Image: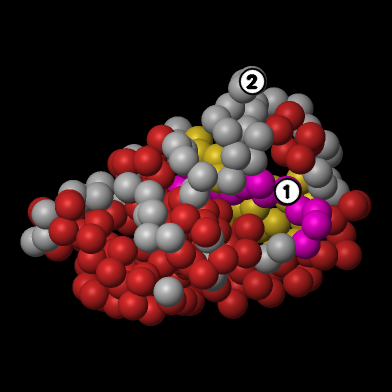
């Protein structure tokens, strides 16, 4: 089973426990489980997920998905108790995700849903490589961070993609993942993104471009468009 956390560290304890999620909201494509603290937010979460479903499933060419189950934990502590992750969200295989429900941020479950869809397309790409796995979800969830707000990028000091895999340096994949996804789609379309996911980030095999040339192309794209 694939377990992958987002926006935080790897598991520090085995999954188990957490708060009671004894309420259910069923939509056309999702089964959402939650407790009383998240109740006022769930209609909005369900609407955001349903709005994202046709776009993300089309982008990643996965129209025939089963219903996806989402578990909405009321706070970070209960999320960690249930999943073992210190993060804002995680996936548990291709058909289930967990998120911290409060405070409200619809991009978080949409991000995790994008991971679920990715796993249906390319099961072996989960967190390997991290830069591509997370860039896809960040892009699909619209989690844009303006490059002009990142001093390192303004100074021309872009992270290597291998650094983003390791979580090294002052710029994270969550800071630049949107522009990586945007670059891939702008240059090669969603077909190119899908090929790259299936190839687990092998740019030469999927796109006909050596990895160092791909990295330079991303830096040039961001500089020209945003800096």
**Residue 213 image point, x, y percent:** 16, 58
Residue 79 in sight here: yes
On-image quarter of the N terminus: top left
Q: Is residue 114 left or right of residue 211?
A: right
> In the shown orientation, is residue 43 left or right of residue 161?
right
Pointer 2: residues within 10 angstroms few (<14), some, or many (20+)?
few
Residue drawn at (49%, 67%), measured in percent from left and top?
Answer: 147
59 sits to left or right of 92: left
Q: Quadrant of the C terminus?
A: bottom left
User: Residue at point 52% right, 59% down?
Assistant: 151
Numbered disc 2: secondary structure:
loop
The extreme top residue here reads: 13
The numbered disc on residue 82 is none
Neighbor class of circle 1 (other Cα within 10 Å; few <14, some 14-19, many 20+) is many
The answer to whether marks 1 and 2 mark residues whose Cβ atoms lie closer than 8 Å is no
Give the vertical position of 96 relative to 177 (above or below): above
In this picture, is 44 found above or below 71? below
Q: Which residue is mark 2?
A: 13
- Please name whichever residue, 160 or 155, is drawn nearer the observer in this view of the structure: 155
Question: In this orientation, which residue lies closer to the viewer: 211 or 103?
Answer: 211
Question: Residue tagged by mark 1?
Answer: 100
Query: Could you tell me residue 223's position as x and y percent?
Result: 36, 71
Residue numbers of the magenta segment: 88-104
Residue 217 in percent (x, y) is at: 23, 66
């Amino acid at each position: 089973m694939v377990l992958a956390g987002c926006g935080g560290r790897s598991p520090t304890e085995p999954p188990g426990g957490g708060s009671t999620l004894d309420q259910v909201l069923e939509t056309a494509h999702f089964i959402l489980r939650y407790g009383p603290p998240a109740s006022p937010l769930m209609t909005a979460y369900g609407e955001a997920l349903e709005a994202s479903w046709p776009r993300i499933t089309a982008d990643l060419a996965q129209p025939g998905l089963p219903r996806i189950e989402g578990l909405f934990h009321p706070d970070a502590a209960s999320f960690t108790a249930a999943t073992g992750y210190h993060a804002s969200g995680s996936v548990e295989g291709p058909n289930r995700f967990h998120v911290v429900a409060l405070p409200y941020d619809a991009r978080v479950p949409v991000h995790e849903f994008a991971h679920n869809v990715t796993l249906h397309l390319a099961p072996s790409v989960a967190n390997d490589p991290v830069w591509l796995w997370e860039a896809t979800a960040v892009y699909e969830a619209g989690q844009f961070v303006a490059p002009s707000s990142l001093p390192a990028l303004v100074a021309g000091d872009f992270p290597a993609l291998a650094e983003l895999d390791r979580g090294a340096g002052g710029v994270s994949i969550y800071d630049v993942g949107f522009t990586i996804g945007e670059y891939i789609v702008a240059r090669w379309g969603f077909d190119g993104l899908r090929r790259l996911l299936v190839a687990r980030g092998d740019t030469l095999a999927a796109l006909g471009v050596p990895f160092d040339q791909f990295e330079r192309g991303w830096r040039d794209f961001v500089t020209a468009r945003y800096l």
